[in-house]
Image (spheres, rainbow, N blue to C red):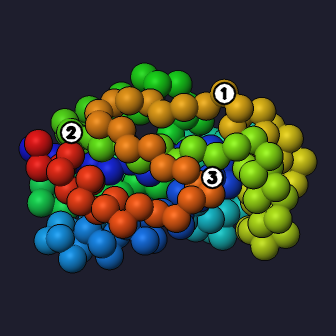
Amino acid sequence: MRQALLINGVPASGKSTVSSALVPMLQKKGFLPIPLALDTVKEALFAEIGTGDRDYNRMLGRASYHAIFNTVAHFPKAVLPVIDAWHGFQPRDVLEGHLARAQINHVVEIWISVTPETAARRYRARSAERHAGHLPISYADEVFDLAGRAGPLGFGDVITLDSEAQLPDDLSDKVATFLSR
C-alpha cells in the first residue's frame, strides 16, 4: 500500500511550518517521510525558465504539482511523501488523477485552518521576501476570501490544526495512528 500525507491549507496558512516540524517527528517514529513542497519545485522552475503573469504562474503551479506526483509514483512504497501544497487550487478530479497515477491508496490530510485576517496579513508580510515569481502582495485580498470558504478535501483521514495554535504534542501520534490503519 502506498500512502501520502497531504499538508493542506490556503496560501500563508502555515503549511511549510507544519511540514518542517512534522517530518522529524515522523522520522523518530520510524517512518521515512520525504518532504515535497509545491513552492520548492515552482521556485526552481522560476529560476530556470523565468517568471511571468498570473496565468504563467498558475501554469507553473500545475506543472510543479504534476512533477511532485510523478516523482512519488517512483518512490518505494516504504517512503512517506509529505506533500505541502494548497491542494484546493485545482479541481478535485485533478488531485484524484494524481493520486491514482502515483498509486497512492491511503491519504492522511492535515488541514491547516486559518482565519481570513491572519492569512491575508501573513501573505502581505511575506510578499517582499518571496521569489518575484509568486503572485504579488495584491493577491492577499483573494487569500482573505479564499480562507473564508476553503476546507479540507477529505480524501482520507483528516486532522485539523489551528494555524494560530501551537502544534499539538500528540500530532505525530495521531498521524502515525492514521497511517497504521
Q: CA distance from mark 2 to mark 1?
A: 26 Å
Which quadrant of the structure image shows residue 28?
bottom left
As helix, strand or loop, the secondary structure at mark 2 comes to: strand
Q: To which residue does mark 2 refer?
A: 106
Q: To which residue does mark 3 refer?
A: 13
Percent x, y for residue 16? 53, 63
Q: To which residue does mark 1 refer?
A: 149
Give the residue displayed 48% in from the left and 49% down from the top: 161
Give the residue displayed 85% in from the left and 69% down from the top: 128
Quarter of the image with the C terminus in it = top left
Give the residue displayed 19% in from the left and 36% down from the top: 105
Q: CA distance from mark 3 to mark 2?
A: 24 Å
Percent x, y for residue 97? 35, 29
Q: Nearer the viewer, residue 160 or 120?
A: 160
As helix, strand or loop, the secondary structure at mark 3 comes to: loop
Q: CA distance from mark 3 to mark 1?
A: 13 Å
